[in-house]
């Protein structure tokens, strides 16, 4: 596969988040998007409904799963034998998120085939802001 998914603890999310240059955090009353360095002090982890910290190489994703917070780390598999068809798409940001000079966000989609041989998106992750 072109990526590896590893489950991690909630405490590890708080520690590892700063290793990623960008963050998207959904709080009860606010959405934070930008450089991790700029938003980290505004994060109230108790009010965090979902968070994604990301780079070209991987993503740290905190989310709610049936009322329980879970976290996974998605990392790019760099071995040639594990390469997978993927592409990166850019989408415009809403005006209220165009801070720090960013106008678009980039998403990577990993593709594979289902049991009928039809192409499908296996995983989507954020990779950057531009």
Image: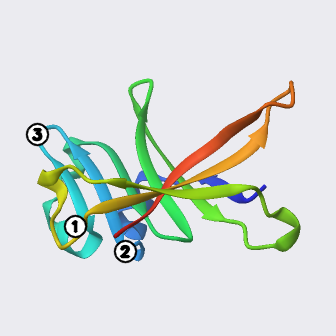
Residue 21 shows which numbered tag?
Answer: 2
Q: Which structural element holds mark 2? A: loop
Q: Residue at x 24, y 58 (%)?
A: 33
State which quadrant residue 88 falls in: bottom right
Please state which of residues 67 and 89 is positioned toward the viewer in this rendering: 89
Name the spot of residue 68 as percent of width and height, x first: 41, 32
Residue in view at x 73 percent, y 73 percent: 78
The one of 21 and 87 positioned closer to us in this rendering? 87
Which residue is denoted by mark 1 in the rendering?
A: 40
Q: Is residue 2 left or right of residue 46?
A: right
Q: Tell me the element at label 1.
A: helix
Q: Position of residue 19 (x, y in %)?
A: 42, 75
The way the protein has been coloured in the rendering is rainbow
Position of the N terminus, as image quadrant, is bottom right
Q: In this image, 57 relative to 122: left or right? A: left
Q: Residues within 10 Å of mark 1 (few under 14, many from 20)?
A: some
Q: Which residue, given by chain and number where applicable, does mark 3 sit on?
A: 29
């Amino acid at each position: 596969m072109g990526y590896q998914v590893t489950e991690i603890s909630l405490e590890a999310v708080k520690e590892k988040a700063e290793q990623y240059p960008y963050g998207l955090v959904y709080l009860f009353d606010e959405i934070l998007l930008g450089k991790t360095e700029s938003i980290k002090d505004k994060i109230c982890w108790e009010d965090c409904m979902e968070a994604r910290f990301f780079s070209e190489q991987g993503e740290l994703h905190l989310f709610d799963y049936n009322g329980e917070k879970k976290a996974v780390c998605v990392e790019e598999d760099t071995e040639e034998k594990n390469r997978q068809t993927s592409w990166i798409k850019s989408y415009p940001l809403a005006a209220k998120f165009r801070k720090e000079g960013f106008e678009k966000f980039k998403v990577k989609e990993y593709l594979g085939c289902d049991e009928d041989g039809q192409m499908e998106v296996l995983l989507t992750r954020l990779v950057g802001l531009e």
